[in-house]
Image: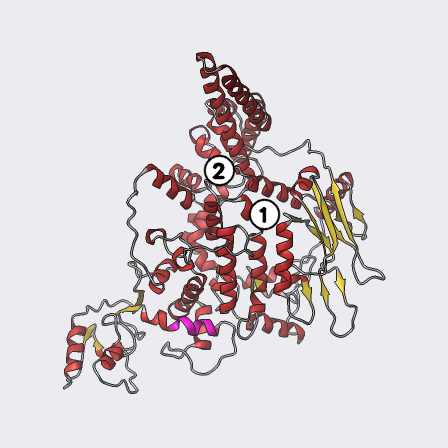
């Protein structure tokens, strides 16, 4: 039965639903979430005001979301358009909620979409070839566009005749098989019924495969491959996404609202007609004089060169075959399937060819800092101070950039000053809670939940882990949610399991499920940042080096007020222990402290030999003259041994270079760092390896 519930629940669900003084109550939010999960409720998307309640105080002003609206799955099935509008409050301290549930008819002008399963039909290539034979004269882009239009028309007619309504086909095939099997139970098996049952099973299997392939394209959940395909979960994902993407209302420039579909269509058409009208602009030709000439004539010629046929084919094969179709409705796999037919018309991939040609030149055109965000709070604070003092202003013109509103959050990484606290990562916890909703856990199998946690949940925190050292209680809370979700399907319900979480978080070769401990991931992500600071030449690395490190690469002593500093302190020793230098002709390698002779530094070997380090400050290059070793005479047996080992090292004459020891290639990677920091276990020897059951289980857990 479809039903909906809305009103004042006197509880907040997410941390961003509360503004003002006072801490967010995690316990109350957990109880509220448990009630929602127990009733299998789905939140209704909201527009308008963010907060629904306020205490109306001048000082200590608090605004929160206490009023919510929910519905069940059948409500979404019945009403294609469900939306909540938060209206303005008048006398009450609560805002009014308006929930609109409309039965929106299916549009008649649905864009063309080529479904992948139709390309497996034996007549598909014949239809495309027939359409592509059309002879046209003109620009290659025009020719390709017209041929694709003709292919669309013929494929629509062909698909309508060759592929019936998939839902009706599946229902009819199921009904026929049931009737035949009922006849077998009543009258017994006969040759005729046996043949009919075999044909009915084949028809049902074909219909099921087509139906599953169609929903696999609609659900757009790339993390799942097998096991949970075509389940109720993915049907619900599609319905929720459709409801969320449905435009139910638009606010006009005069403040009025367009609420019906006809009014929305008229307003959109008039808006873009006005938007594309010619307008007067202020030209800034003097800005062109400030752009340096970086590309040489050879670089420009390489960009303008006509690509060869092999290059075009490689670009086509590099395209994701299962990605969402572009505006023309064709998937990437269409061009692979029909390559022999369409290869002469390569206009489709011109943009991809251009990006591939430009890729080698991008490091010279774009700074490293322009490809990411500034990982320190000083950048945005400094620019805002310049704006406040009048030293910086927005550019004039109709599309000027307002520098007064610089972002302080990127990829859910919030910029702040000081030690990372639990309140700083609450937005990430909210995101994880939304992903681990109970209705998802109940609709997924155990293998599906493992894959969901490994592929989706573990990746949410990666960008934040790359900058900040998370508090222990936040790490433990997220892992508790992950553990509960895997075993019980509900992140708030603990189930007694004899397998420890440490055993679960092992590679599959060691008997685990391939999930990584979040603390280990946090550790190696910060190790990557530290490695970049110490060994890359970017402006960001130089900035952090001067801020956090001494001239010799060691950490500065004392306290530094920074949100990044605590994490770098945690991993700096681990990075130093895994460095290995190659001797060249530069002044980078410290003779005593760096590991250039073997896996230990000379200072560490001296301490192990019973000596003391003292205040030793010497570079390796001090003992190199004309690319040859030049050591003074020494009396110490320890130093004689060091000199003998050093003389066996070939001086390359290149620059000093530091390698990452855990990697065979000497290049830092998250995987090699994780293997180096974790506690490994012996590999498990499965006695049933190679059996069909083992291969099936492995394929299911791998998601391949």
Q: Residue at x 66, y 69 (%)?
A: 393
Q: Which residue is mark 2?
A: 332
- In the rendered image, which quarter contains the C terminus? top left
Q: Is residue 133 magenta?
A: no
**Which secondary structure lies at badge 2?**
helix
Instruction: Examine the image and state in which quarter residue 142 appears.
Output: top right
Q: Is residue 569 magenta?
A: yes
Q: Residue 302 or 643: which is nearer the viewer? A: 643
- Label 2: how many residues lie within 10 Å, few (<14), some (14-19) or many (20+)? many
Instruction: Examine the image and state in which quarter residue 215 appears.
Output: top right
What x and y, as percent, mark residue 471? 50, 69
Front label number (1 vs 2): 1
Residue 439's tag is 1
Q: Which residues, given as a range, are shown in magenta?
A: 566-572
- Label 1: how many residues lie within 10 Å, few (<14), some (14-19) or many (20+)? some
Left or right, 206 with reference to 251: left
Q: Residue 363 or 186: which is nearer the viewer? A: 186
Estimate the spatial distance between the alpha carbons at disc 1 and disc 2, rounded to whole Å: 33 Å
Q: Is residue 173 above or below residue 100?
A: above
Marks 1 and 2, the one that precedes in the sequence: 2
Q: Is residue 595 above or below residue 182?
A: below
Q: Residue at x 53, y 61 (%)?
A: 291
């Amino acid at each position: 039965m479809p039903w909906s519930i809305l009103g004042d629940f006197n509880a907040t669900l997410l941390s961003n639903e509360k503004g003002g003084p006072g801490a967010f109550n995690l316990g109350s939010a957990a109880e509220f979430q448990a009630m929602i999960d127990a009733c299998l409720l789905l939140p209704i998307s909201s527009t308008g005001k963010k907060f629904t309640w306020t205490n109306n105080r001048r000082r200590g002003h608090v605004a929160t979301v206490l009023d919510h609206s929910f519905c069940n799955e059948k409500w979404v099935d019945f009403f294609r358009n469900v939306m909540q509008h938060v209206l303005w409050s008048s006398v009450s301290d609560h805002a009014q909620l308006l929930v609109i549930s409309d039965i929106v008819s299916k549009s008649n002008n649905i864009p063309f979409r080529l479904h992948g399963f139709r390309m497996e039909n034996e007549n598909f290539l014949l239809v495309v070839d027939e359409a592509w034979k059309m002879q046209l004269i003109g620009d290659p882009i025009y020719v390709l566009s017209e041929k694709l239009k003709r292919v669309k028309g013929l494929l629509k007619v062909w698909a309508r005749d060759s592929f019936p309504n998939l839902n009706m086909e599946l229902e009819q095939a199921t009904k026929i098989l049931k009737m035949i099997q009922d006849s077998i139970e009543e009258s017994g098996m006969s040759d005729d019924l046996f043949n009919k049952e075999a044909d009915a099973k084949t028809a049902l299997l074909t219909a099921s495969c087509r139906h599953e392939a169609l929903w696999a394209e609609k659900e757009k959940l790339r993390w799942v491959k097998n096991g949970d395909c075509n389940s109720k979960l993915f049907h619900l994902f599609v319905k929720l996404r459709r409801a969320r993407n449905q435009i139910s209302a638009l606010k006009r420039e005069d403040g009025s609202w367009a609420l019906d579909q006809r009014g929305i269509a008229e307003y959109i058409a008039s808006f873009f007609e006005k938007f594309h009208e010619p307008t007067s602009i202020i030209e800034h030709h003097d800005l062109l004089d400030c752009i340096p000439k970086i590309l040489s004539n050879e670089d420009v010629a390489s960009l303008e060169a006509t690509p060869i046929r092999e290059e075009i084919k490689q670009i086509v094969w590099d395209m994701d075959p299962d990605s969402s179709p572009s505006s023309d409705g064709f998937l990437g796999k269409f061009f692979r399937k029909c390559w022999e037919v369409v290869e002469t018309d390569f206009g489709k991939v011109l943009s991809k060819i251009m990006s591939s040609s430009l890729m080698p030149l991008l490091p010279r055109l774009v700074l490293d800092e322009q490809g990411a965000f500034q990982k320190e709070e000083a950048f945005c604070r400094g620019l805002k101070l310049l704006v406040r003092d009048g030293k910086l202003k927005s550019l004039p013109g109709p599309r000027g950039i307002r520098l007064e509103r610089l972002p302080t959050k990127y990829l859910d990484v919030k910029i702040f000053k000081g030690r990372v606290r639990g309140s700083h990562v609450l937005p990430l916890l909210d995101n994880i809670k939304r992903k681990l909703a109970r209705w998802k856990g109940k609709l997924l199998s155990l293998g599906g939940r493992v894959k969901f946690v490994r592929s989706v949940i573990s990746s949410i925190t990666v960008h934040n882990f790359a900058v900040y050292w998370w508090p222990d209680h936040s790490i433990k809370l997220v892992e508790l949610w992950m553990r509960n979700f895997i075993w019980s399907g509900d992140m708030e319900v603990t189930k007694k399991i004899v397998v420890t979480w440490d055993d679960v978080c092992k590679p599959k070769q060691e008997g685990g499920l391939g999930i990584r401990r979040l603390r280990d991931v946090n550790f190696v992500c910060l190790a990557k940042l530290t490695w970049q600071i110490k060994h890359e030449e970017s402006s960001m690395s130089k900035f952090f080096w001067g801020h956090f490190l001494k001239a010799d690469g060691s950490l500065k002593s004392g306290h530094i007020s920074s949100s990044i500093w605590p994490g770098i302190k945690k991993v700096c020793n681990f990075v130093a222990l895994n460095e290995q230098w190659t001797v060249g002709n530069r002044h980078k390698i410290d003779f005593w402290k760096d590991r250039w002779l073997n896996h230990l530094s000379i200072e560490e070997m001296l301490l192990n030999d019973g000596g003391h380090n003292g205040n030793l400050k010497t570079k390796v290059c001090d003992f190199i003259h004309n690319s040859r070793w030049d050591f003074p005479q020494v009396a110490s047996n320890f130093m004689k041994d060091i000199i003998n080992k050093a003389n066996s090292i070939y001086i390359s004459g290149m620059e000093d270079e530091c390698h990452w020891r855990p990697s065979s290639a000497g290049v830092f990677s998250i995987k090699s760092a994780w293997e180096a920091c974790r506690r490994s276990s012996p590999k498990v020897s499965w006695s049933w390896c190679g059996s069909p059951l083992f291969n099936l289980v492995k394929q299911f857990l791998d998601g391949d």
